[in-house]
Amino acid sequence: MTDDADSNVAEDPITGEEIELPADVEVGEIVDNPVTGAELEVVSVDPIVLEEAPELEEDWGE
Amino acid sequence: MKVGVCYSRIRKDEKLLLNELRDRGHEVEKIDVRKLTFDVADTHEAFEDLDIVVDRCLATSRSLYVTRFAESYGVPIVNSHETADVCADKAKNSLALEDAGVPTPATKVAFTKETALEAIESFGYPCVIKPVVGSWGRLMAKIDSRDAAEAILEHKATLGHYEHKVFYVQEYVDKPDRDIRVLATDGEPIAGMVRSSDHWITNAAKGATTDVFELDEQARALVARASEAVGGGLLGIDLMEIADPEGGDRYTVHEINHTVEFKALQEAVDIDVPGAVVDWLEAKVASEAAEVTSG
């Protein structure tokens, strides 16, 4: 947690770097690493844990 | 009300919806379908005491099963399994529109490379081939020549999944460099936008630019009929403007989406899109409760 109430930080499991996340982030949410663009999934919020998001599947989308 | 939201990813669309539900004081049960097993006989506890379930599964296969299970458990789900089943498959989607007399591009389905080539040649060049299941404009091809047709069919025939051997061939609609997405609830438009691109695929997921679209009477009427044709619900209805209309039809409906994304629409219009969706959910639950009481 940072001092900023509007944001959180968590470790990118791919790069090991800390990335900033919104304060209202929730389980299941997909966030992008702002530098690498990698999609990460929030798997827990207390503490915040990120995992590499699943690869795009053929039947995904609307 | 107590609302279940089935998902496997919380995208911006789901976040907007979840925040709107919570802001209004509704109880939300997030249901990550990857973590559940569904018993055909016993209702999963995650579905108990829910007034309504919203299917936001990103994977079409999951969406089709989840909607069916929810209905078997006796829990109202939007969209219904019937709607999901028709919208998930482009061939069924086209058939439903055609059966309802809704203007839709001429389409043929074939099961072999040879008959697919016959379908392509019957349309002439250019024409379009699309996967029956899929989205975001992926694996769609505009075919400009017989050589290209033969190459594409060869590739599709060797792709692993059997659905690639269902060849969905469509006339190429000579539209302006844009198409129209209307978000509607049971045929009533919430908002519309145009998606513009120099590329023939004018999909927001492919980088098209968006702007508000004000529906005229003909567009409104088409949206209502298209929605009814697939069983209603929260739908993204895609229309194209016909460059040289015959018989007074200025639009053609090429697709209806049943787990519709709306973040691009929210950015294009001033309307509170998730607010309108939740208004509709509240009305739906109130109407079901009234039916139970009067029944």
Image (spheres, coloured by chain):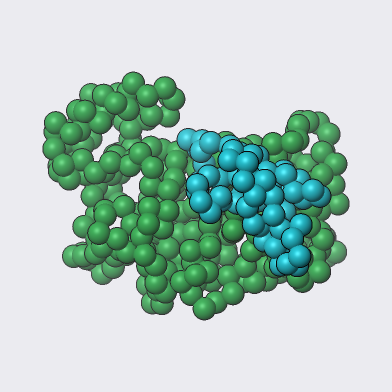
Figure disc tally: 0
Residue drawn at x 41%, y 58% as measured from the top left: B204
Q: Chain B in the picture: what colour?
A: green
Between B141 and A17, the one lying in front of the other is: A17
Left or right, B94 with reference to B21: left
Query: In the figure, A15 relative to B253: above or below?
Result: above
Q: Picture coordinates of residue B283 (x, y %)? A: 71, 69
Q: Which chain is cyan?
A: A
Q: Residue at x 67, y 71 (%)?
A: B279
> Residue at (21%, 57%) from the top-left corner?
B174
- Against B260, residue B284 (above or below) is below
Query: The C terminus of chain B is located in which quarter?
Result: bottom right
The image shows residue A50 at horizontal and vertical percentages of 68, 43
- Give how far across and how far down residue B239 sits, in percent: 37, 61
Residue at image location 14% in from the left, 33% down from the top:
B146
Tell me if B87 is positioned left or right of A30 in this view: left
Q: Is residue B45 left or right of residue B90?
A: right
Position of residue B80 measured from the top left corner of the image (x, y, whole percent):
63, 49
Residues B186 and A58: in front is A58
User: Is residue B264 in view from this perspective?
Assistant: yes
Height in image: A49 above or below B278?
A: above
Residue B187 visible in the snapshot: no
Quarter of the image for the N terminus of chain B: give it. Answer: bottom right
